[in-house]
Amino acid sequence: MAYDIERYLNVRGAGGPSMGPSGELAFMLDTTGSNQVWRLDEPESWPEQLTFHDERVVYASFSPTRQELVYGMDEGGDEFVQFHRLSADGSEDVALTDAPDAKHNWGGWSHDGDRFAYAANRRDQAVFDVYVQGRDETGEDAELVAAGDQFSRISAAGWSPEDDRLVLHDGHSNFSHDLHVLDLDSGEVTHVTPFEADTRFSSVAWTPDGEGLYVATDHDSDVRYLGLLDPETGDVERVVDGGDWPIEAVSTDHDSGRLAYVRNVDGYSELTLAEADGTTLDEYPVPELPDGVVFGLSFGPNADRVAVSLSSPTDNTNVHVVDVETGACRRWTNASTAGIPRETFRDVELVHYESFDGLEIPAFLTLPDGEGPHPVVVDYHGGPEAQRRPFFTSLRQYFVDNGYAVFEPNVRGSSGYGKTYMNLDNVRNRMDSVKDGKAGVDWLTARDDVDDDRIVAYGGSYGGFMVLASLTEYPEAFAAGVDIVGIANFVTFLENTGDWRREHREAEYGSLADDHEFLESISPTNNAEKIRSPLLVLHGANDPRVPVGEAERIVEVASERVPVEKLVFEDEGHGFAKLENKITAYRTVVEFLDEHV
């Protein structure tokens, strides 16, 4: 039985787990149409909703000592997140910050639950400072503990076991990071990663004794490994070598000395739990988790359990709780599949193809029933330093159930395959990633089960640029394009993106000062006369990352040559968070493809 797109968009997801001091579980669930905070006290019991906003809640974190949480919420997708303190039964909700033109990035609770840390750009939109605020204080009372003027883009990354220091993460770009340690008593900031070469830290956690830092890093390596950083010397010892696949996350419980880390194996997650003693890890049995993607580690009291979000192509996102000592796993949440039988969800196939220069490109392919030939949606991810992974997505399942194949390539520039691969598309190599997409189309059309006259370019954010560039560079290869919150002109994008992002993104795309002419030359708005395919453009009016002007520009120039539809949501930002808007957006996508493909 085929289901309407609205039914698929009503498939729910439960994630963002945070375990409380008594073993209860808080998590995000979008049953009401946008993510709100919910609570469970035991597995698969009836959950209790704790927040009731029209706007999305982006995360929640349980106090380590009290029956309360801090959660963050923005307005209309603008990403200017503000903090609230919420009692664990939902009866009290107190605004902790009130700076609606500033972003607040969570940095964690102190171990006593009396304070929390965060970074915010309240003084200057281009600069993030680090603050410490008492649980019962307002933002006006927060103490500025590290001014951001001396950093690129600073964030608070965790309290030391004695709550006397904070580790600070400074992101110069997506491939160049530094770590600093802030002494909260003296205010002294120590640079602990004085490395000459670019180094990336995707995750950091204090050792239980507070003498070192566990880091997921690619320092002196192409692929991230689990290392132990000595803050006194800057030396990094390898604890776990990821081999060909990166270690992407690490978390520690300071009281118990237990550690968890996640390895990304060609998109799929491997979770390891262990006792940690410096560079020695005494591993527990392998957790009995289904194959898929693991994210959002949260230790329970005494670290006897760890909660994770898990998603797979055939299982919508839910929170699972693992017994650390035995590896036994139980799903706690039961997010609805909207009445669609789970057994009807299609699995993906991991494939690889050769690009124009011999580089091997990984991709996920999902096929519908029948021998074909099938129309294909080529779905480009954003980032570009991101990775298409075997998550559950409602749209993929809808397309496959309605006769489309779905092809999801990880073109050069994607993360998850080492820093060499991730940096292959930087600046002047930008269009090589578009060539990778075309090589994927050529691989597809060589198959007997693919209709080469019905290939759709589809993508969001940087994936939206990939769509537009694919239509301008290879106009005969695609029957239609769907651009969602995409970059249409790199110059206007960099000029108008949020002040806090510009320098960060120039490191990837090229600078306005040095690369202006090149950026104009590859921008789809300046090559729109080549487009031959119908185009659908969707955007959020409040998008702080890729401003809505990008949609307006490509629509203006492309509509002179091909059929173009535009849909802008006044209460959304970089993507669509509200269910009503999702239904409108993706029903429009379906109708557009029904007409043109």
Image (cartoon, helix red, strand yellow):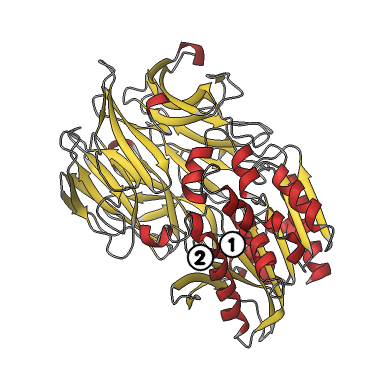
Q: In this rendering, would 105 be left or right of 395?
A: left
Give the residue drawn at x 84%, y 68%: 595
> Could you tell me the amino acid type at mark 2?
Val
Cβ–Cβ below 8 Å for labels 1 and 2? yes
> 140 above or below 84?
above
Q: Residue 85: image x %, image y %?
A: 51, 23
Q: Residues within 10 Å of mark 2 (few under 14, many from 20)?
A: many
**Horizontally, is 43 left or right of 99 in the view?**
left
Assign the C terminus to one quadrant of the image.
bottom right
Q: Which mark is residue 411?
A: 2
In this figure, which residue is indicated by the disc labeled 1?
Answer: 380
Give the CA distance from mark 1 to mark 2.
Answer: 8 Å
Residue nearest the viewer, comparing 491 with 293: 491
Picture quadrant where residue 267 is located: bottom left
Q: Amino acid at mark 1?
A: Tyr
Query: Which residue lies at the image location 65% right of the left edge and 37% below the top edge?
Result: 77
Residue 69 appearing in the image? no
Q: Is residue 232 above or below residue 561?
A: above
Q: Is residue 170 above or below residue 330?
A: above
Does the image show residue 142? yes
Q: Is residue 207 left or right of residue 200?
A: left
